Image (cartoon, rainbow, N blue to C red):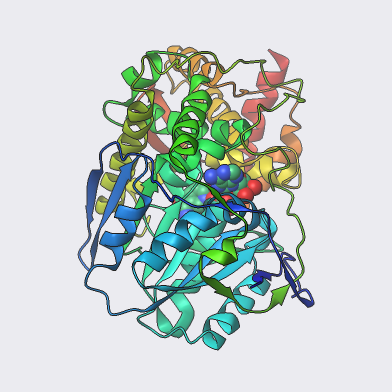
Amino acid sequence: MTTLAKIAASATSAAPATTATLAPATTLATPAPITSIATLDIRLPHTSYSILIGGGILREGLRRAFAGRPAKIAAVVSDENVWALHGGSLASALRELGIECHAEIIAPGERSKSLASLETLYSSFFRAGLRRDSPVIAFGGGVTGDLAGFAAATYMRGTPLIQIPTTLLAQVDSSVGGKVAVNLGEGKNLVGSFYQPSIVIADTDLLSTLPPREIRAGLAEVIKYAAIGCEGLLPLLERAPLSGIAGVARGAGKAREEGEAHMESRASAAGCIGGTGGASETGETGATEQPGELERLDRPDMPAQSDGPDTLGGPDGRDRLGEIVRLCCAGKASYVERDERDTGDRMMLNFGHTFGHAIEKLFSYKTYNHGEAVSIGMMMAVRAGELMGATDPAAAGALGRLLDSAGLCGYRESFDMERLIPLMSGDKKNASGGGISLVLLKKFGSPFAARASQQELAELFRREVRL
Ligand SMILES: NC(=O)c1ccc[n+]([C@@H]2O[C@H](COP(=O)([O-])OP(=O)(O)OC[C@H]3O[C@@H](n4cnc5c(N)ncnc54)[C@H](O)[C@@H]3O)[C@@H](O)[C@H]2O)c1
């Protein structure tokens, strides 16, 4: 029995070498029918690539990704949850294409986005015989995408990168646009690069196993796109409660299961090999729920919700989920095409993030995941704009309704702004000495860039508390 590699999850040191077997993974012996493949092209001066979006498109996407490539081996970087659930499908699809798959499995969670993990990946890639033309496949959420992406950007001065995002957040945001990074003890994403993938394959059926809390985290980014005016998105989101998206994603999963002939006992049996690695250590944002089960809401600030029927509005919910992903990716693509290096317009994508990153940090990355923090951050940004007299008061209502409908929480006045605001100054989006960069809304759908000093923000929110 082949064992699979794990790499260190510690942010500061490589863990001792060990190997581990993983839970059973499924294989698409009889693939679920493909919906249709929507293709978006990102065109940049130095490169261009496609984003493929649709349900059940993994195999076809991989076929296109490897068409015309001489590579016979690829490194797959995935996390334990994703690999256990979907590794077999990926490995068998690669095997069909005659590609040897070298799997490196990281512990789930933010702590795997570390320099220590990177070093383990580089060594393992080298020992497995990966060279400059051997693609790295990032198969997971934003953590995996950012880590594997930075490894691809730097290993042998750059190898091809295939992004296969498996969370909603990664499908609508992190897999597109080329930002890749790891964290330092001092903060998130402080070491990184701009490195565009050669293709993005967003198979929405992979979301079928995503815990509802992670679906909600992705919905926060989806709502962000609507708030900054991403074309066509708002009517689709307003049509029905967003909490139904979790149900739609799981429905696709059921269809998939029905189409599967059998469960494969080990992902390794599908033909993947692994190197040696470090011990597992669950990161603080790792999924603790059983995938596919309804999450029991244990946070008092989160409104209760039910999945409801296919509340995306009809039997074509799977297509609508794909359409939401497509519209968000189209929105992101247009910003990236205009401003790849994030020196101007692309900053609008940061709406809610300056507050959000500080909230994540204030709670030591333990209480709120990225999307939850961004949802609160968006409401805070709207409130800040209102207090400055720059934001139409109707914006808060529009944003709040969407967040409610997704089961996300908004602004809570109990935040300690005296501690939060200094943390915002550390955000890497701030130019040195120029105050805190903010994205505010003139009205819902119309963002603009603003800057405020710590003192100005503190004064605004002091007034807020007195109101
Ligand atoms: N590069 C960018 O442009 C960009 C943009 C936004 C966020 N990010 C980064 O993305 C990261 C957050 O990404 P995320 O929210 O995807 O987190 P994540 O990668 O940690 O995934 C969240 C959890 O979902 C699990 N999971 C993933 N896919 C699954 C599936 N299909 N079924 C069941 N479980 C699954 C993972 O194991 C993990 O426990 C942060 O590090 C953030 O900084 C990057």
Q: Is residue 405 visible in this depiction of the protein?
A: yes
**In this picture, is 106 found above or below 326?**
below
Quarter of the image containing the C terminus? top right
84 relative to 378 in the view: left or right: right
What residue is at 42 percent from the left and 16 percent from the top?
392
Q: Position of residue 300 (x, y in %)?
A: 76, 20
Provide residue 176's location: percent of width, then percent of height: 37, 52
The residue closer to the viewer here, 202 or 219, is: 202
Residue 43 in the image: above or below residue 118: above
Q: In the picture provided, is 369 more to the left or to the right than 252?
A: right
User: Residue at position x 53%, y 41% from top?
Assistant: 353
* Quadrant housing residue 15: bottom right
Residue closest to the eye, 126 or 315 = 315
Residue beneath the point at 35% across and 63% down: 196
Outermost residue toward the front in this view: 261
Above or below, comparing residue 407 to residue 416 in the picture: above
Total numbered circles: 0
Indicate the position of residue 140 as horizontal and vertical percent values. 52, 53
Q: Quadrant of the N terminus?
A: bottom right
Q: Is residue 190 visible?
A: no
> Residue at (74%, 43%) from the top-left corner?
362
Location of residue 120 by image quarter? bottom right
User: Of 200 and 462, which appears nearest the observer?
Assistant: 200
Q: Is residue 64 above or below residue 54?
A: below
- Comparing 98 with 284, the one in front is 98
Residue 39 pos. (x, y %): 23, 46
